[in-house]
Amino acid sequence: MLMIALGTRTLILAVPILAILASPGSAKPYTPGDDAVVLERLPEKNQPSLTELKRLRATLLAHPRDLEVATRVATRSIEAARATGDPRFLGQAQAALNPWWTAADAPAPALLLRATIKQSQHDFSGALADLDRLLTDRPSHGQALLTRATILTVQGRYKDAQRDCAKLLPLASALVTATCLAGARSLNGDAGSAYSGLTQALARPGEAAVVRAWALTLAAEIAARRGEPAAAESHFRAALALDPRDSYLRGAYADFLLLAGRARDVLPLVANDTKNDSMLLRLALAEQVLPEHAPAFATHRTELSDRFAAAKMRGDTLHLREEARFRLEIENDPKAALALAQQNWKTQREPADLHVLAKAARATGDAVALKTVADWIAATKLEDPATVALLAGTAR
């Protein structure tokens, strides 16, 4: 089984290909107290994988230590999290692995899925510990290398990530390897050649649709950061044609459209996925500048405020970036936004995390925070004109 990864989400390449979202919904993954708890009634008739998951969970209930069944339940639960945008399925995945969740000697399949779930919960150190343990015994485990490269990229450890990506050359397809490498190289002063190598790999025929969608999404993000909006839009649209349900992709495209002042185009991307905090935030950001959507904006603003308050009561820190944007761009509270963005930056160092930190720092005039942004750009040679403009005070 091989997965592919983008940002903080991981795709599991199996039959069929699956995916997990780092922050796909409105709450920290919930682990039910017993198997009888109804999480949500879903349209199983239209989603055969959910019917299969239900059957597998019944089998696992009778044989809770059957590793093969447990890993299938965990994998299918991860697929359901992607298909529905509901993070509670990640709780089902964790529950399936309960016999091995804290075991130091957990078997490789359980270690891999355990790391994947921890990654989705932003427990990056825990995920890395599991992956390091797995790779010590199996240094050529392609999925573990790819997942570790993803986490290292999120942490800004680009050279380490590239080393893991390079080890994929004999283990994965040219497009998977090129996309893994491009993710780290594009953030470390090599965006031009990373983009060129990625688009060349995309030009070759073949590869599964979900792999191409992953690669196209990254190509779009690199093009957008480099100030090439036409190319970025072309890549986003091609990716959506291949995988229209992908929440990460739709969120990235929505951010691209919002930055371009195209709020109306955001609505159809996110309006039907408001259980997902990230999608609801982007919907509210779009509605905020569309006068005819003022009533809906007021409702969604209140709903977001309630969700973030509930997350705080739970001690849930999965959505710090989103809350920072909410405080800054909707609530007009730059001081609170900066505190959230700084807390988020301690664990996540993707371009979107840096951008919200820069925006909040500029809004508050905080010289120390602005220096943090400037130092990061200088140290990594990040090519991101929008964030540089914030530093210079020339962004709109």
Image (cartoon, rainbow, N blue to C red):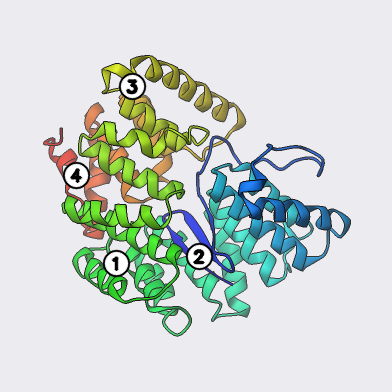
Badge 3: few (under 14), some or many (20 or more) residues near its Cα, within 10 Å?
some
Looking at marks 1 and 3 on the same chain, the residue that comes earlier in the sequence is marked by: 1
Q: Residue at x 21, y 51 (%)?
A: 384
Disc 1: which residue: 185
Disc 2: which residue: 147
Left or right relative to 101: residue 239: left
Instruction: Report, in whole angstroms, how far the alpha carbon at label 2 lies from the one at label 3.
Output: 36 Å
Which residue is farthest front? 45
Disc 4: which residue: 386
Q: Which of the numbered marks, if any, corresponds to residue 333?
A: 3
Q: Position of residue 343 (x, y in %)?
A: 43, 39
At label 4, the amino acid type is Ala
Say which of 21 and 57 sits in front.
57
Q: Which of the numbered marks, if any, corresponds to residue 324?
A: none
Q: Are marks 1 and 2 in contact (CB under 8 Å)?
A: no
Say which of 251 and 169 sits in front.
251
Displayed quadrant of residue 133: bottom right
- Residue 87 visible: yes
Q: Are marks 4 and 2 in contact (CB under 8 Å)?
A: no
Q: Secondary structure at mark 1?
A: helix
Looking at marks 2 and 3 on the same chain, the residue that comes earlier in the sequence is marked by: 2
Instruction: Report, in whole angstroms, how far the alpha carbon at label 1 lies from the one at label 3.
Output: 35 Å
Q: Residue at x 31, y 70 (%)?
A: 202
Say which of 363 and 259 sits in front.
259
Looking at marks 4 and 3 on the same chain, the residue that comes earlier in the sequence is marked by: 3
Left or right relative to 275: residue 350: left
Badge 4: few (under 14), some or many (20 or more) residues near its Cα, within 10 Å?
some
Q: Secondary structure at mark 4?
A: helix
At label 1, the amino acid type is Arg
